[in-house]
Amino acid sequence: MSTSEPGQSGNPVVTQGAAPETAGLISPFPLAEMTSLANEFFRALPGQNALPPGSAPASAPGIGPPSGASLPAPGWNGMDPTGPSVAAIVPPPPAPISPPSLGAIAGLVPGGPLSGLAAPGVPALPASDKILSESDLVRLAGEALSITGSGVIQPAASTVPGIPGAQTLSTGALDAPGIAPAAVTSPGYAGPVLAPSSSAGAPSASGAVAPQQAGAAVAPPDSLTRAATLPGAGLPATGTDWPGAAITGAGASPFALPLPEACLGDNARLLNPAGLDLDSSLPAIPNLPAYANEEQAVALARSAASPYFLRDAGALLQPVGQPHAGASVYEPVLDQDLKLVRNQFDVASVRRDFPILNERVNGKPLVWLDNAATTQKPQSVIDRLSWFYEHENSNIHRAAHELAARATDAYEDARQKVARFLNAPSSKEIVFVRGATEGINFVAWSWGKRHIRQGDEIILTTIEHHANIVPWQQLAAENGVVLRVIPVDDNGQILLDEYEKLLSPRTKLVAVTQVSNALGTILPTAAIVAAAHRYGARVLIDGAQSVSHLRADVQALDCDFFVFSGHKIFGPTGIGAVYGKPDALEESPPWQGGGNMIADVTFQKTIYQEPPARFEAGTGNIADAVGLGAAIDYVESIGMENIARHEHDLLQYAMREMKTIPGLRLIGTAKEKAAVLSFVLDGFKTEEVGSALNREGIAVRAGHHCAQPSLRRFGVESTVRPSLALYNNFEDIDRMIAALRRLKSVGA
C-alpha cells in the first residue's frame, strides 16, 4: 500500500512498504557501487561529465527534490502513465540511498551542473546558471520519447517479452499536470507533431500553438516540480534493459546510445560485476506489472487498460484528452467487426485547421453538424487554391509557356493523388467531373447507353440518393430497361439474400451507395460486387458519403466504377472524380464533345483521345481539382483509420445520448453505420427542430435529404440529420443534446 504526503516543494512524495514476499530481505547489490559504475559508463561517452560518487549539486532554498528522492524503485518499468513520477519514488527499505538523487544526476536542479544526460548530436540544455524553461523540458522529453509525426512512439527495442516494439515509455507522461502539450520535433522527422491531447497550447498541423485558455492549469514556478512530471526515459528498467537501445540516427533518443565495446559480449559483467539475477531479485511495486513472463505481458497489452496502441487489440480506451466541464463521461466501446486501429487523435489540433469553426451564429460558436451535405475546408486547401490563382493560373495542355506548364503539372498531380487515394492502379483510370452526380450521369449516358438494352435490368437499393436513381430511370425510359430494388430491414441494412434473388443473366449493372446519406448504413459492397460479377454484371459504387469516413480501395472492392465528390472530403465544390476499370472506360464512348477530348478533327470525322481525356471536354475545373489534391493530402496526413475511429466513438456516444430524449426516434440503426444520425422528434416538425438548433448555433440538415424512397421505407417524409466529421468533438454533441432537451421541455 502506498501513501502520499507533502514534500519540500509541494509535490507528493510516495512512500512504500516492502512487498510481502520481499519483506525483511537484504538488498542483493550495493547501490553506491552501481552508481559509481554508471558514472564510469557515462564518463566514457564523448562529452560526458559524470558526477563524483556521493556528490550532489546545491539547490536553492525551498527548491529541489524531497528528502530521500532517488532512482526509480526497483521493479517499476515506467509503463503505467498513471504511476508515480520518477522523482517521487523511494525504494523500499532496507536499502538506504546515499548516491546522488535523480534530479542531481539529470542536471535538472536549478543551479546544478548539467551532467550525465548530454549526448553527442542532441541539442544542449541551457547553461547551468539558467533555470530550465518549460520548452526546454518538453524538448528534452520529446528527444527521450522519439516522437514521430503521427504522435505515436516509434517502435524500438522491445522491453516487454513477446511484444515487438513495446516500450517502457508512455505518451501519457506528456500530459502531466502543468505541462501543456506542445509540438515536438526531432531532427529525423520533417513535420510538427499533433499533440496527444486536446489541452490548451497543443499545436496545429502548421506548428502554431494556441494561447492557453483562461482557467487552464498553470505550471508550478520551479523547474524541478515540472521536471518531476517527465518520464524517467533515461533510466533502465533493470540493470540490463536499456529503453530505446535500438533507436539510432538523427531522431534517436539521447538514452539510446550504443554501449561501448568494453561493455559488450563477455565484458558485459562491467555493468553487473557480481553477476546477479537483477530481474528476479528486484521487488515489484504493488499494483504495477512486473512482466514476469510473455503470457502476462501479452495479456496486459491486449487489455483495455493497456497504454499501447495496437491494431485490433479489443475495446478502445477513453477519447484522448479530458472532457470539458459539465460534459458526460463516456468510454466508447467499438464494434469488433469494424477493426479500427487504436491511435491517438487530437481533435483540438484538427479544429484549428478549419477557420470557419471560429464563426459565431446567433451569438453562439458554430457547431457544424451538416457534414453529409458538405464538409468545411482546412486552411491548407484554402491556401492551395489561393496559391494556384496567384502563381499558376493558366489553361492546361497545348501551351509552351511557364504558367501553362505549372497549371498542367498541378492538375495532373491532383489526378495522381486521387488515384493513390482510391488505390487505383493508374491515374489514367481517373476522370475528373463536377461531382458524384455528374459522375453517375457520365456512366449512365456513356457506358450505360451503349451497353444496356431493352429488357436488360439494373439493380439499385432502397436507400439510394436521388443521384443514383434518376439517371437510371431516364435510361430505363429511353432504352426500355427494367429497374429492380434491393429491400432493407427495419434497421436500414440491405437484405443480401433478397439481392441474390434479383440477380440473373439479364442483370447488366448494379449501382449502389457505399454509405447511405440518409441513414448512415454501411453496405457490404465487396459482397455485392462479387455476386454481381458472377452474373457478368458491371458494378458502380457511389462513394460520395463514404470517402470521408472509410478507406477507399477500388482494387479490393473490384468495382467497375467508383464516383465521389470533392466537397464531401474537405475539398472545393464543383469537383469530383470517377474511377473506371480500363476495359470499362475503353468501351465507353465520349458523352460530351469539344476541345481537349479530341486527337484530330475534320469535317468528315473526329478521332478521340484515349481515356481519361476522352471524357473531359473543354476547360475543366482546374483550380478545384488542385484543391481536391490538397484535401486528399490533408486527410492522408491524419490517417483514415484515425478518422474512422474518432467518428465512430462520437457516433456511439451521440446515439446513446439521443436515445435518452423522450419522443426521439432514430431512423437507421444498422450495426455497421457511419457518422449519420437521422431522427424525428414527437410533437415537432423537422424544420422546427432544425430552426431551434440553428438558434443555438448548431447547423443540421432538415428535410428528405434527396433520399425520399429511403425515408418512406421507415414511414416518414423527412428527418433531422446531424452528421459528423473529423473536426467534431464531444462538446458539439453535448450542445446538440442540451438544445434538444430544452426544446422538448418547452414544448411539453
Image (tube, rainbow, N blue to C red):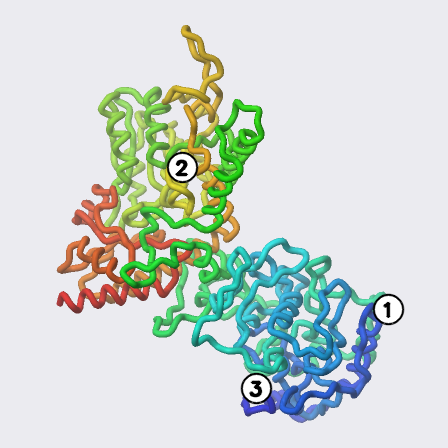
Residue at 44% across / 22% down in the picture?
Answer: 614
Residue at 26% across / 20% down in the picture?
Answer: 454
Disc 2 from disc 1: Cα separation: 64 Å
- Mark closer to the chain start, 2 or 1: 1
Kindly identify the amino acid type of the residue bearing the numbered disc 3. Asn
The quadrant of the picture occupied by the C terminus is bottom left
- Residue 358 is situated, as x and y percent measured from the top left of the image, at 39, 59
Report the front residue among 572 and 155.
Answer: 572
Quadrant for residue 42, please give it: bottom right
Disc 3 from disc 1: Cα separation: 40 Å
The quadrant of the picture occupied by the N terminus is bottom right
Q: Residue furthest top?
A: 604
Report the front residue among 680 and 77.
Answer: 680
Q: Which one is in front in this view, the residue at disc 3 or the one at disc 1?
A: 3
| As drawn, 453 above or below 159 | above
Q: Which residue is denoted by mark 3 in the rendering?
A: 11
Kindly identify the amino acid type of the residue bearing the numbered disc 1. Ala
- Residue 613 is situated, as x and y percent measured from the top left of the image, at 47, 24
Q: Which residue is denoted by mark 2 in the rendering?
A: 575
Q: Which residue is denoted by mark 1 in the rendering?
A: 262
Residue at 22% across / 46% down in the picture?
Answer: 704
Q: Is residue 722 left or right of residue 66?
A: left
Residue at 72% across / 65% down in the picture?
Answer: 122
